[in-house]
Amino acid sequence: MKASTHAEIYRPFSGELRTYPMRPLTLALSGIRLGLRKKLPAFLLFSAPVITSLVGAIRVYLMYFFADMMKEEGGLGGRQIGAALEELLGDVSANVVLFVKTSSLFSLLAMTWFGAGMIADDRRLGANLLYFSRPLTRGGYLLGKLVGLMFFGVLTLALPVSVILSTAVFASPDWSFLLRESAVIWKSAIYSGVWILTVSIIVLALSSLVNRKTLALALAFGLVIVLHGASEAAAMLLEVSELRLLSLPYNFEVFADWLFDQPLSTHANPRYSICAIGAFAGAGFVLLMRSLRKMEVVA
């Protein structure tokens, strides 16, 4: 038998490699579908934000409704009833701030639940071997996971706040809320954006350290709840208020009060709290990139 070489099959490649810029979006949609697969946890976690948005919208609507009714009635009795209702319901802006803070707590629970397994499950199943063997960079992988987790933050924080603000805008007479208190709208957007991005980075960073969702949940709740309680107790026992800066919920509460021009507590310093939030987000980002680098090298 005589050996022969078919050189005609070795032709140089003269085309162009196809790129897939939407792969991070595909990864994000996959994470959203996996998170919504279990109906009961999704129903329970989404119920609280829905109820909060409805209660907030009804409360704001009633404030403007009773204000218009008392204005039309007039007289001493009408003014007294209007003053009593105003004292009971409070100011519209103060109510918006209250429901923003409440929604952020429910958002923390939902984002922790849905985000704890986004990277941990990939490590457990070895999905990173498939992702990084394809033309998918660490930046694209991180962007896909961030977008997927921030989607749940938008559903549980930004959307309920938008419902309350929209009610305030359309229920106010002569668009008074939009004309006089429009700062509340963009301040709510800033707070929601900072909260969603910071929590997303921290939850994904903790998820990248382990290969089980339950362990990631324990780390996340331990960091937020246990550290919050420990910092509050240490600050009271040692009389050092700066120890509260170790608490993420405390820093965001001070940040919200400062951003919305609400009264601050005696020892609260918004500059320190903003720096602490940046430190939490920065440490989470560094830890996340380090873990993703190891996952890419293994792949």
Image (tube, helix red, strand yellow):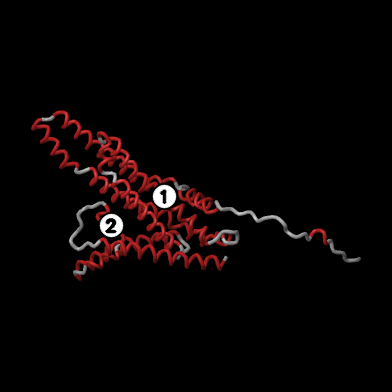
Report x, y in % for residue 60: 25, 39
Q: Is residue 13 left or right of residue 266?
A: right
* Number of dots carrying numbers: 2
Tell which of 161 and 238 is nearer to you.
161
- Using the rendered view, name the quadrant where residue 235 is placed: bottom left
Query: N-terminal of the two: label 1 or label 2?
Result: 1
Report x, y in % for residue 96: 27, 45
Q: Is residue 34 left or right of residue 229?
A: right
Location of residue 154 with respect to 288 vertically, above or below: above
Residue 263: give its label. none
Where is mark 1, residue-wise?
152
Which residue lies at the image location 35% right of the left edge and 60% below the top edge?
A: 221
Give the residue type that dot 2 points to: Phe
Decide if residue 222 is in sight here.
Answer: no
Which residue lies at the image location 30% right of the left edge and 49% below the top edge?
A: 100
Real-space CA distance between mark 1 and mark 2, rounded to the nearest whole angstrom: 22 Å
Where is mark 2, residue-wise?
255
Report x, y in % for residue 297: 55, 68
Q: Secondary structure at mark 2?
A: helix
